[in-house]
Amino acid sequence: MIVRKLSEARQSDRRVRSDNWESTRLLLKNDQMGFSFHITTIFAGTETHIWYQNHLESVYCISGKGEVETLTDGKIHTIEPGTIYILDKNDEHLLRASEEMELACVFNPPLNGKEVHDESGVYPLEADTVS
Ligand code: 9YT
């Protein structure tokens, strides 16, 4: 069994930060679970263009408010505590936070941790990363 504490992981290199969000990777590829698990904070007032072409992701909202827009059809879905959105088609999307949001995120395949320093594996279109 593996046990980790978010408060401790946040003090380590598991925590990464960009202009629009910060994320603590609690579970990564080398744990050999077949998925990775992250607690991500999206900063209030931000819009982030995301397109995980190599990963499927589920995102559960713990707190805060926002919306996600899928770019193929322009549909907008509100996000509030208890909402999960599931990117089952590697959906390109815009993630907006009207309030700071705390999200629990699961990736398949798992992130390997290199994305901490080089996000190209997460966001293959480098020009389209966090705005
Ligand atoms: C909301 C979202 O897509 N979060 C992804 C996890 C975070 N960007 C990370 O750990 O890289």
Image (tube, grey):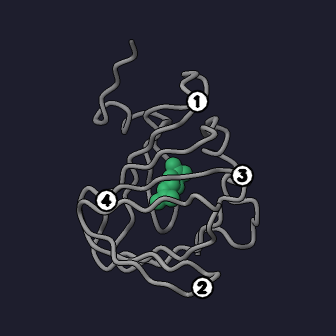
Mark 3 and mark 1: Cα distance apart in space: 14 Å
As shown in the figure, which amino acid type bears the numbered disc 1?
Gly
Q: Quadrant of residue 102?
A: bottom left
SS state under label 1: loop
Mark 2 and mark 4: Cα distance apart in space: 22 Å
Q: Earlier in the sequence, mark 3 or mark 2?
A: 3
Measuring from the top left, give residue 93's x and y in whole percent. 57, 74
Front of the two marks 3 and 2: 2
As shown in the figure, which amino acid type bears the numbered disc 2?
Asp
- Which residue is identified by label 2? 73
Mark 1 and mark 4: Cα distance apart in space: 22 Å
Mark 4 and mark 3: Cα distance apart in space: 22 Å
Q: Are discs 1 and 4 less than 8 Å apart at CB?
A: no
Which residue is located at x 23 percent, y 63 percent? 81
As shown in the figure, which amino acid type bears the numbered disc 3?
Asn
Relative to 80, is 37 above or below?
above
SS state under label 3: loop
As shown in the figure, which amino acid type bears the numbered disc 4?
Cys
SS state under label 4: strand
Circle 1 residues within 10 Å: few <14, some 14–19, many ≥20: some
Mark 3 and mark 2: Cα distance apart in space: 21 Å
Which residue is located at x 55 percent, y 35 percent? 35
Side (left or right) of 66 relative to 128: left
